[in-house]
Image: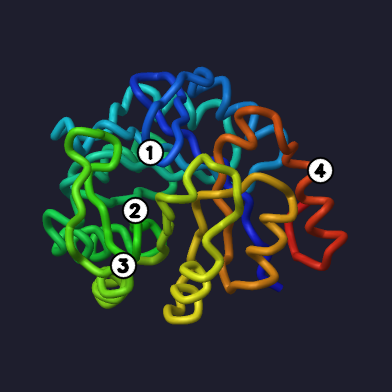
Amino acid sequence: MLKMRIIPCLDVISDKVVKGTCFKNHKVVGNVIELAEKYSLTGADELVFYDITASGDNRSVDKKWISRIADVINIPFCVAGGIRSVQDAALILESGADKISINSPALENPNLINDLVSRFGSQCVVLGIDSKDNFVYQYTGSISKTTNTGKSTMDWAREAVSRGVGEIVLNCMDQDGVRCGYDIKQIKLMADTYNIPIIASGGAGTKQHFLDLFQKTKATGALAASVFHKHLIQLAELKYFLKDNMVEVRL
């Protein structure tokens, strides 16, 4: 049976992990290498790293810390941030990442999805969608550049799936960092519509929020940040709670 994934998310600036609320007011919460190792040892199924200012700064993700992370963890990890070419992606994967995630660069050039899938396969290519009021936002790591693209969230997901993307992380912006629960309605719609893994992001505040997500939607993974960074939820306790409530997880 498919096991649900619990995925800590690490937003990175330089080699520091930061966390904000609704994509604003970021504060440093730790060192990227140290937190990556900690989560790997305490039960994370996967990690996601976002170099959050890369796209807005018109650069690719800082690769210095990717190989260092690969050296200290033994679980899959995904890297995102300004990946605009097959060459950018190749360097990241060669440095030890298992997947790459694209967001703003795919909006700039949708053919990038096709190019990456053709070279690396769908299983390596994740699309991040930052969604607010059912519209897609771009350059969300930079307050001054954050832009409503005018694209419908569902229309953009449909196009990305048709181009071969293997997984979607749906970041519900209004829920980000507020710990009031995942946007069940929006996540359910996407997970019911597309036959690829949908990872929910934005809103986790309690163990019950994770349970609600898996009981009420077909999402196959839950991404969260502040509840783990601030020690509000322990990974092992969360997994046993989910298991006790009939959600299949890796223990």
x%, y% of residue 181? 60, 54
Give the spatial CA distance, label 4 vs label 3.
34 Å
The image quadrant of residue 79 is: top left
Give the spatial CA distance, label 2 vs label 4.
29 Å
Please name the amino acid that badge 3 sits on. Thr
Circles 1 and 2, Cβ within 8 Å, touching? The answer is yes
Q: Nearer the viewer, mark 4 or mark 1?
A: 1
Q: Earlier in the sequence, mark 3 or mark 1?
A: 1
Q: Which residue is mark 3?
A: 153
Give the spatial CA distance, label 1 vs label 2.
10 Å
- Left or right, residue 134 beside residue 5: left
Please name the amino acid that badge 2 sits on. Asp
x%, y% of residue 234? 75, 37
Q: Which residue is mark 4?
A: 237
- Left or right, residue 148 beside residue 52: left
Which label was assigned to residue 130?
2
Which label was assigned to residue 23?
1
Please name the amino acid that badge 1 sits on. Phe
Q: SS of the residue at dot 3?
A: helix
Give the spatial CA distance, label 2 vs label 3.
8 Å
Front one among 137 and 118 = 137
The crowd level at tag 4 (other Cα within 10 Å; few <14, some 14-19, many 20+) is few
Q: Earlier in the sequence, mark 2 or mark 3?
A: 2
